[in-house]
Image: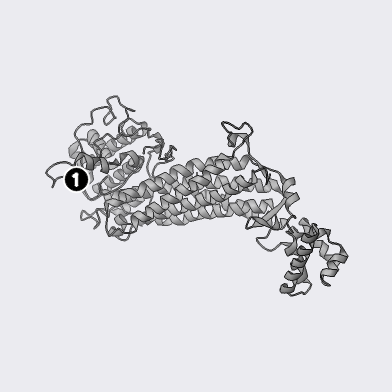
Amino acid sequence: MSEHDGAVPDGETGRDGTTAGNGSGPAGSSSSGGGLTAGGPTSDVGAGGRPGAVGAPSGEKVALWGGRFAGGPSPELAALSQSTHFDWRLAPYDIAGSKAHARVLAGAGLLAEPELARMIDALDMLEQDVASGAFLPVLDDEDVHTALERGLIERAGPDLGGKLRAGRSRNDQIATLVRLYLRDQARTIGTQVLDLVDELITQAVAAGDAPMPGRTHLQHAQPVLLAHHLLAHAWPLLRDVDRFLDWDVRASKSPYGSGALAGSSLGLDPAAVAADLGLEGGPVENSIDGTASRDVAAEFAFVAAMIAVDLSRIAEEVILWNTKEFGFVRLDDAYSTGSSIMPQKKNPDIAELARGKAGRVIGDLTGLLTTLKGLPLAYNRDLQEDKEPVFDQVATLTVVLPAFAGMVRTMVFDTDRMAELAPQGFSLATDIAEWLVKQGVPFRVAHEVAGSCVQECEARGIELWDLSDEDLAKISEHLTPEVRGVLSVEGSLASRDAVGGTAPVRVAEQIEAAKERSTEYRFWADPE
């Protein structure tokens, strides 16, 4: 695709066989990508004599460039350039942009009111045919823009249909369409992330005051509440949604009106187009920047990669906790798989796939950044490669997140097993040291005393609470019988009552704060 970019129809499979896109339409548009029919340019879906249906006559071939060339592109170049197999998902946004552009052409006196009415009628018809699958790209269509201009000309005629190209380039078109698409997808993914957050919160509430062994370096460290641990995964996901909110402000700027790179001399109103498309940030400040920059896509890709990383970290723990050795969690049959040879197996495939796909989503980010790193201003054809990475991220996350939320919702924790292990591994040693500090002992000394307690227990094969009062006194005169108040999981947990700590009173507050944050973000992600 020349001077722009692209995507697969909604419902068409992406590189991993997952369905791409959620079908949401552009702001300010009545279209819905959900009606786009699977099938690429060679599909016969929708054939039946409707204008532009694959398998039906497509009329005169439409090209958006070529006047200075002696002939058409070679078959090899045409095959390399074609992008309808992945940019067709942008069709609803392209049509919305065309309607907005037609209105500013009329406002500038370049379309008469009757012409505008006919143009909008033709675009409405095209929009319906795209949604129903009656209009699809054909092999001669270089990209989504070419296909839709062909569809418009078939419905409005070449004289009127040909007027829509005035004052715009595929460069500013595609830069705008990608923003519209990604803003919709950010809300879809954000909603799915919040669904997962809510499942984590629900599990945290159900866990109550159940303790578990907290770990550092995967070794026993200190007892914590299971609820505290679950919420430690919820907060990063909430920050991911917050990143999308912050990104959305920058994505709300409209490159429409930038033309190929220098703007337009036709007296058009870019602010009107931005308002029409729901881009409340208004026009970009610099037309070269508007057509050449893809930081909006790169930033989206980073947030998507961060979500994948956060999912992968949860997945790793679920995989470990589901082993016989840990025995912390049981997975529901509906969210597990078996073995083709070992009848006893029950595998955590959702967690493993989420962990595996994190590498793919990270790769999409690094691939996009590598494409962008050496490009001079303004537009370069390399930018055709900016869309498939983010399209793939969307296709991946919108499949992984619902499955992951279902897995979390149906997990059953063995809280007895967790409680049994919570004090093991001398995890109360820090409580001894901090108790000594409260008695006025310097922490350096307190740390050594607590370490001596651990050494004594290891030598005798006992736990800290098995030390007698005499044993404690021999280790240090500072260890009076009152220290036993912290030699229990309950005492340890209750003592950690600073803000953000694992004390039950603080975790209860944290649960309410997480609920409020999730509700707040839903007003952005799903305002309806």
Q: Give percent across and percent down for residue 387.
A: 36, 47
- Residue visible at 66% across and 48% down in the picture: 204
Q: Give percent across and percent down for residue 168.
A: 24, 50
Residue, disc 1: 65
Exactly how many numbered labels are in the figure? Answer: 1
Relative horizontal placement of residue 214, taking residue 141 as reference (left or right): right
302 relative to 8, above or below: below
- Residue visible at 43% across and 37% down in the picture: 17
Q: Quadrant of residue 467?
A: bottom right
Relative horizontal placement of residue 419, taking residue 36 as reference (left or right): right
Q: Give percent across and percent down for residue 386.
A: 35, 50
Identify the element where label 1 is drawn.
Answer: loop
74 relative to 382, above or below: above
Neighbourhood count class around disc 1 (C-alpha, 10 Å): few under 14, some 14–19, many 20 upward: few
Q: Quadrant of residue 436?
A: bottom right
What amino acid does circle 1 point to? Trp
Q: Nearer the viewer, residue 297 or 528?
A: 297
Quadrant occupied by the N terminus? top left
Furthest-top residue in this view:
48
- Residue visible at 55% across and 47% down in the picture: 194
